[in-house]
Amino acid sequence: MFIYNIKINGKAFIKILFVIIAIAITIYFCVSAYKIYNNSFKVKDELQDPNVLYLTTKNYSNILKAVHDDVDSYIGKKICFSGYVYRLLDFKETEFVLARDMIISSDMQTLIVGFLCDSKNAKDLKNETWIELTGEITLGEYHGNMPIIKVKEIKQIEKPENDIYVYPPDDSYVPTTMMF
């Protein structure tokens, strides 16, 4: 049986404790500074093209409403957004809606909203497939005049875990047509 008798010097113990705490604070500070530095340079796709309308869940329905209300001001503008493929029975083979579900009540009732899109590759897209597209706003015909997105680029994406719903338009959206 071993018996140890350890004598601890109070001043040495405080110095060691102080060094350990200082090292922990320094490590915490370095990790925090790295995260702040790393996140400060993260911008979606570095710099976004100012000549393209980028739709997000926050501005989706505001831009959708603005384009439908004044389609002439938006003809020829580029647009980039994501959603899921949705079709109606009377669509042409090249047509689909790139849709989102808009929450319209507090009990999570939704309404499907989106832009009608035209793409020669539309028949290859399955319903409810999530995609991101870039296209150009044109004036088309579907039960009257309406904006139609002529698709330039499509890429399939995974369904987002968050931000799948959009919300009704509000009065905070200022049309960007004057900025182009």
Image (cartoon, rainbow, N blue to C red):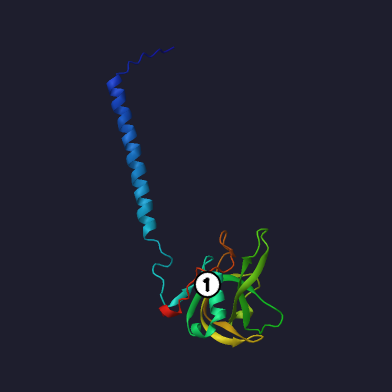
Residue 5 location in percent, x, y? 36, 13
Q: Residue at x 31, y 35 (%)?
A: 22
Residue drawn at x 36%, y 42% is: 28
Residue 167 pos. (x, y %):
58, 65
Residue at figure coordinates x 40%, y 61% from the top left:
42
Q: Nearer the viewer, residue 141 or 152?
A: 141
Taking the image as drawn, is residue 155 in sight? no
Across and down, in percent, residue 77 comes to 47, 82
Left or right of 127 in this view: 119? left
Q: Residues within 10 Å of mark 1 (few under 14, many from 20)?
A: some
Q: Which of these two is toward me, 65 or 127?
A: 65
Q: Looking at the image, which residue sits at the far right?
A: 89
Q: How many marks?
A: 1
Of the 4 image quadrants, the one containing the C terminus is bottom left
Give the camera-side residue of 66 and 122. Answer: 66
Q: Position of residue 45 (x, y in %)?
A: 42, 68
* Mark 1: secondary structure: strand
Q: Nearer the viewer, residue 93 or 90?
A: 90
Give left or right: position of 10 versus 79.
left
Q: Which amino acid, mark 1?
A: Phe
Residue 16, quarter of the rendered image: top left
Up-down relation of residue 33 to residue 59 (above or below)? above
Left or right relative to 171: residue 103: right
Question: For the N terminus, which image quadrant?
Answer: top left
Is residue 63 something one can see in this rendering? yes
Mark 1 lies on residue: 81
